[in-house]
Image: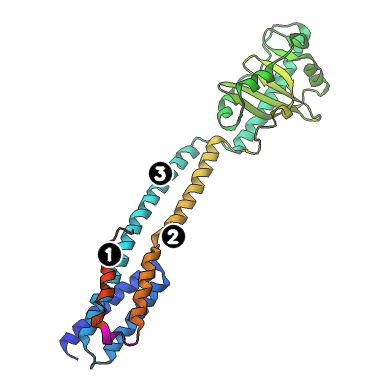
């Protein structure tokens, strides 16, 4: 086998190796079939020295090199688009990390609710004593407003100003008014009867104003605490039916959850986009495969310039 023959076979193997790497990268059946068919054609020349070796070189020039160049262009474009997706993923992950460092978790909220319930129950016991003894002592537990200050933004449900006004409206004749607080008379009576055993139910917010809703542990009755006026009144949660109480996550936790879901979606999209080949290109490659699979392909190699030109023209398109 002469030097010219060996050189072309070596160059042929190089082209086939390039095509193999691209077939592995794209995992596209048509590309893999073209790679296998190209191997067959190479072996045909390698095992039959009487064949015109220049036709193998011409085959690679007209077909293999164009296919490789086309697939490389698609790969480069895909990688550029994937890099944009991962840039967005990285940005989202940075935001997630920053928010996780400051977010109040559901467990923290649950523990704080229990402490707040104890504070309210202690406050109401003291308020009863103050009212009974006509005292001017301050009945409220220490830092009783810190709970709302910490958790209202993330965990309290939003209501309109009109809803807030309706909730805190009362008849002055039906309440006890003290220097420090106002409480509905019947509410104080039920509190005494139930031994001041209540628990935090949920919080409401309207602008900068907040309301805390509490529930009696052993009876299905509710009351509100409005810090803006140190006001305690019965309330009925059914008056707020339109509120969505299904969400138990803080606003920050919801944002984190949404960002994590978006990142998972972006990663899935990136995995698909990385090896995507436009349908028009696949159709063209199918045509290419059928051409080189023709048993008389090599006999008419010089007549296939049109097909080769179509491949080369595709390299210059804005399809991707």
Q: Can you tell which mark lies on residue 91?
A: 3
Q: Residue furthest bottom?
A: 50
In-front residue for pair 113/257:
257
Mark 1 → mark 2, Cα distance in angstroms: 22 Å
Q: Nearer the viewer, mark 1 or mark 3?
A: 1
First of labels 1, 3 by sequence position: 3
Image quadrant occupied by the C terminus:
bottom left
The quarter of the picture where residue 312 lies is bottom left
Foreground residue among 78 and 55: 55
SS under mark 1: loop
Contact, mark 2 vs mark 3 (Cβ under 8 Å): no
* Disc number for residue 315: 1
Left or right of 205, for residue 83 = left
- In whole angstroms, how far apart are the C-alphas of marks 2 and 3? 21 Å
> Magenta segment, which residues?
295-300
Task: Report the label total.
Answer: 3
């Amino acid at each position: 086998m002469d030097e010219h023959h060996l050189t072309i076979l070596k160059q042929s193997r190089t082209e086939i190796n390039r095509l193999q790497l691209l077939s592995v990268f794209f995992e596209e059946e048509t590309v893999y079939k073209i790679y296998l068919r190209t191997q067959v054609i190479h072996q045909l020349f390698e095992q039959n020295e009487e064949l015109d070796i220049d036709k193998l070189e011409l085959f690679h020039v007209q077909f293999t090199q164009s296919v490789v160049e086309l697939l490389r262009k698609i790969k480069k474009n895909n990688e550029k688009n994937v890099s944009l997706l991962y840039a967005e993923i990285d940005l989202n992950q940075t935001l997630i990390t920053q928010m996780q460092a400051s977010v109040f978790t559901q467990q923290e909220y649950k523990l704080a609710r229990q402490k707040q319930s104890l504070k309210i129950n202690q406050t109401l016991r003291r308020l009863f004593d103050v009212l009974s003894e006509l005292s001017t002592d301050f009945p409220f537990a220490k830092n009783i407003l810190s709970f709302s200050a910490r958790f209202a933004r993330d965990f309290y449900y939003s209501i309109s100003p009109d809803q807030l006004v309706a909730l805190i409206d009362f008849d002055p004749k039906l309440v006890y008014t003290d220097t420090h607080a106002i409480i509905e008379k019947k509410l104080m009576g039920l509190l005494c009867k139930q031994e001041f055993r209540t628990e935090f139910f949920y919080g409401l917010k309207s602008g900068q104003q907040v309301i805390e809703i509490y529930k009696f542990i052993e009876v299905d009755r509710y009351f509100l605490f409005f810090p803006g006026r140190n006001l305690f009144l019965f309330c009925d949660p059914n008056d707020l039916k339109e509120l969505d109480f299904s969400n138990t996550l803080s606003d920050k936790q919801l944002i984190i959850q949404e960002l994590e879901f978006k990142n998972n979606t972006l990663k899935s999209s990136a995995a698909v986009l990385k090896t995507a080949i436009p349908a028009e290109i696949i159709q063209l490659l199918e045509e290419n495969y059928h051409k080189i699979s023709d048993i008389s392909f090599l006999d008419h190699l010089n007549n296939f310039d049109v097909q080769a030109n179509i491949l080369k023209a595709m390299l210059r398109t804005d399809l991707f």
